[in-house]
């Protein structure tokens, strides 16, 4: 279907690894099986659009995670259509840009439909310009159409117009799909469980990010000068990410000096790193489409003060107990609860919470008094997206009544292959009622873990220094 002449047939963009292409084909087959179980139909899945940053400058392009999960195809202006029969047999069509020698000279090489079909293993491919003309025929006489609800601006009206085109053929005896379903509902659950290839990529992302955190600690260590600023440490991160082969940061890096660490979504800014103050760095790279997400907190100059160390050890113990609670069969909320108990005890012991106001750990938890110092959850799913998709409630289970009488969905049962972060913290803003030695200390420790079949979890980010002695050692070179 593609007639444009390419600059040279041999000149193509980089081809993904064979294992990745094979995994994508397996995922398309698995999705087809799930659609067949629901009566068959057609799945439509576009990739992300290019986005303008300002005037004619674009943001760096990033594919849509769902689309890439099923295709490994990284070009914009692409859409995957998967026609699924009731027995699970399926037929895939990739719509992508046709080859165009002139545009490729300016914007970069393209596969074009023919090479894309052959290399990526689709059953068919066609130029994206022919989408409106060809799609109604794919939807004709199918039971249902599946597409990602609420993800792509304008997709809903395009789907309606394709359905309208099919309805216009009613007098020829053709019927339009009678049902529409959210494709994300099927894909979210598939993406929640990482296969061996995905775990390989996540280990690689984690390893590069661990190197980056070590590099940052060294830069902020014994040799740190008076002019060291947050952006200098961000530069160390970016260097390590790209030097390690990662494509980009997985999210905006947080480099927060001193009191800035108490602002949860602070980004790397201009603030000077004062010797003896703490610095919180929350940063991870994306490698071949997979995120890592690490937080470390260290003292500028490389020695924890007594008060810093006191709070740090509480957060560290909370994090270690949360990791120990992360195993198959446990619920998603269990690591959070394990962390909360340690934090609550620590807040009482160090005097940030007064025993006159809350008698014991249970009192701290029931009253929610810890929320002044710990206001976020301990975990989120991690994968292609840093806050990855996947239901946090166990499917098919009724909501439960909690001790505080609220009705909450039963939290997800952890199973092998799920990847989540473990990231407790304590954030103490200066206030007259709090001991001065803790003022403006913000501490978070975050690792990425995989639930393992053997009964515990693998810490992907264990190579980033975490104990007081490990951190002080790295910072002193
Ligand atoms: N970096 C975002 C998070 O830790 O969730
Ligand atoms: Mn993080
Ligand atoms: Mn996180």
Image (cartoon, rainbow, N blue to C red):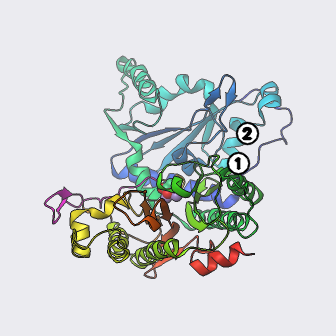
- Residue 22 seen from this side: yes
Q: Residue at x 35, y 20 (%)?
A: 170
Q: Which mark is residue 111?
A: 2
In the image, the segment drawn in magenta is 388-409
Q: Residue at x 61, y 39 (%)?
A: 124
For disc 1, the neighbor class at 10 Å (few under 14, some 14 to 19, many from 20) is some
Q: Please say whether residue 397 is one of the residues in the magenta stretch.
A: yes
The mark that comes first in sequence, 1 or 2, is 2
Q: Secondary structure at mark 2?
A: loop
**Side of 322 where 256 appears, left or right:** right
Prevailing secondary structure class for the magenta stretch in the rendered image = loop
For the C terminus, give its image quadrant: bottom right
Q: Which one is in front, 140 or 275?
A: 275
Q: Check if mark 1's residue and mark 2's residue have beta carbons within 8 Å.
A: yes
Q: Please say whether residue 113 is one of the residues in the magenta stretch.
A: no
Furthest residue toward left: 405
**Side of 362 where 90 appears, left or right:** right
| Residue 389 percent across, percent down from the top left | 44, 52
Quarter residue 464 falls in: bottom right
- When the figure is inspected, residue 442 is found, relative to residue 358, above or below; the finding is above
Q: Which mark is residue 119?
A: 1
């Amino acid at each position: 279907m593609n007639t444009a002449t390419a600059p040279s047939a041999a000149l193509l963009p980089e081809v993904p690894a064979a294992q990745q292409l094979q995994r994508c084909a397996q995922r398309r087959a698995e999705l087809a099986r799930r659609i067949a179980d629901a009566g068959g139909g057609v799945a439509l899945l576009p990739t992300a659009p290019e986005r303008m940053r300002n005037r004619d400058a674009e943001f760096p392009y990033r594919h849509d995670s769902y689309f890439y999960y099923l295709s490994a195809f990284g070009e914009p202006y692409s859409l995957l259509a998967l026609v699924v029969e009731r027995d699970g047999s399926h037929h895939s069509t990739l719509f992508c840009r046709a080859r165009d020698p002139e545009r490729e000279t300016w914007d970069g090489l393209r596969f074009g439909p023919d090479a894309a079909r052959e290399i990526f293993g689709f059953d068919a491919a066609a130029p994206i310009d022919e989408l409106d003309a060809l799609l109604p025929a794919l939807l004709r006489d199918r039971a249902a159409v599946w597409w990602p609800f609420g993800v792509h601006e304008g997709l809903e009206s395009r789907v309606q117009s394709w359905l309208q085109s099919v309805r216009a053929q009613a007098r020829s005896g053709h019927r339009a799909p009678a049902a529409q379903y959210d494709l994300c509902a099927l894909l979210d659950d598939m993406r929640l469980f990482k296969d061996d290839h995905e775990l390989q990529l996540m280990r690689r992302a984690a390893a590069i990010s661990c190197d980056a955190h070590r590099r940052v600690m060294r830069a902020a260590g014994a040799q740190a000068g008076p002019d060291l600023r947050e952006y200098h440490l961000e530069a160390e991160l970016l260097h390590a990410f790209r030097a390690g082969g990662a494509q980009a940061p997985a999210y905006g890096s947080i480099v927060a000096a001193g009191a800035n660490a108490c602002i949860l979504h602070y980004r790397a800014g201009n603030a000077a790193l004062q010797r003896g103050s703490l610095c919180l760095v929350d940063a991870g790279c994306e490698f071949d489409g997979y995120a890592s997400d690490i937080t470390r907190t260290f003292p500028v100059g490389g020695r924890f003060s007594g008060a810093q160390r006191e709070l740090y050890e509480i957060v560290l113990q909370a994090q270690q107990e949360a990791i120990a609670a992360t195993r198959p069969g446990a619920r998603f909320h269990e690591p959070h609860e394990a962390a909360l108990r340690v934090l609550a005890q620590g807040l009482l012991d160090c005097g940030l919470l007064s025993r006159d106001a809350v008698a014991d750990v249970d009192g701290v938890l029931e009253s929610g008094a810890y929320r002044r110092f710990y206001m976020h959850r301990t975990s989120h799913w991690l994968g292609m997206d840093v806050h990855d998709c996947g239901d946090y409630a166990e499917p098919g289970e009724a909501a439960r009544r909690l001790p505080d009488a609220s009705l909450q969905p039963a939290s997800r049962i952890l199973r092998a292959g799920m990847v989540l972060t473990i990231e407790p913290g304590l954030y103490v803003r200066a206030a007259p009622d709090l001991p001065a030695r803790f003022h403006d200390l913000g501490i978070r420790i975050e690792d990425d873990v995989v639930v393992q079949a053997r009964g515990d979890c693998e810490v992907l980010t264990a190579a980033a220094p975490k104990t007081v002695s490990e951190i002080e050692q790295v910072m002193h070179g």
